[in-house]
Amino acid sequence: MTVTDLRSYNPLVKVLGPIPAMVVAIGSRDPVTPALFAALALALLLAGGRLPARTLGLVVAGTTALVGVMTVSFGAWTDPALVDHTHALVRLGPLTLWSGALENGLATGLRVAAVVLLALVSGLTTDGADLVRAMITQLRLPYRVGYAGLAAMRFVPRFGQELETIRSAHRVRRVAGGRGPVAAVGRQLGYAIPLLAGGMRHADRVSLSMEARGFGAHPTRTERRHVPFRLRDVVLLTALVASALLLPLVSGGPR
């Protein structure tokens, strides 16, 4: 199966399909199984994510750093009584770094990385509005709930824009100047009130707009844009579920 553009697939497939793989990765105890799931998710992002090189670089660097930090930290925190039968790699005074502890830390880090990468398959290639439309169409989610949630999610970027506007206005007026933690706290408190007022005004406008359009007046709603569930979505969903069953067999199962 060749995945050319994950953005064109049904969002429900990308959200629900990786869940069995996440469950298997979390329940695994060897480092090979989660590493295979992480490689699968990364391959999907590389082949069909159509992500900018910077985003891919951040994903790879971030997950690699996460695995490295968790390997060393869990290796240092593991009870020596549980791994003293393995090889002692480093001795620093009272601290001994055992190979078994590092292996446990590596397996834990790879499990977390696999779950993160599998979640990013949908998170980086799915539009929130399409996900809501798919849930309404295929999962029969009440459209009142779906579009109310979508309206709430769209508050976030608007808050970001308003916060930047407030910061610019404060800089122009030289409000809450100075340096240090006290001045920083004062600046944040100065942003809170106008940001809250702006959010309430925006919520009121959205509410009036939805009422003016008769939102919620009928049990069903005609969708302007349909999100289909096609044969290729079934193939991708089947492949993701099959990977959750087959990859542990390839890795040899729990160790």
Image (tube, grey):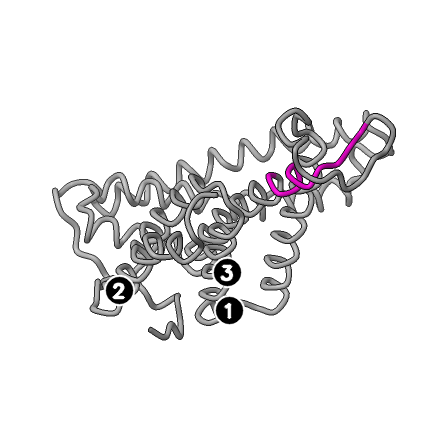
What amino acid is found at the position of numbered circle 1 in the picture?
Leu
Q: Residue at label 3?
A: 39
| 75 and 80: which is toward the camera | 80
**Picture residue at 75% right of the left edge, 38% below the top:** 88
What amino acid is found at the position of numbered circle 3 in the picture?
Ala
**Side of 247 relative to 165 (left or right):** left
**Picture residue at 46% right of the left edge, 72% below the top:** 47
Kindly report the distance in space between the C-alpha atoms of the residues bearing marks 1 and 2: 19 Å
**Side of 183 relative to 144 (left or right):** right
In magenta, the rendered stretch is 95-104
Kindly report the distance in space between the C-alpha atoms of the residues bearing marks 2 and 3: 21 Å
Image x and y of residue 202, in percent = 45, 40
| 58 and 24: which is toward the camera | 24
Query: Vertical placement of 248 versus 74: above or below?
Result: below
Q: Residue at label 1?
A: 46
Disc 1, SS: helix
| 130 and 239: which is toward the camera | 239
Q: Is residue 214 magenta?
A: no
Of labels 2 and 3, earlier in sequence is 3
Q: Are marks 2 and 3 in contact (CB under 8 Å)?
A: no
Q: Residue at label 2?
A: 233
Image x and y of residue 80, in percent = 68, 27
- Of circles 2 and 3, the one toward us is 3
Image x and y of residue 81, in percent = 65, 24
Q: Main secondary structure of the magenta part?
A: helix
Q: Quadrant of the N terminus?
A: bottom left
What amino acid is found at the position of numbered circle 2 in the picture?
Asp
Kindly report the distance in space between the C-alpha atoms of the residues bearing marks 1 and 3: 10 Å
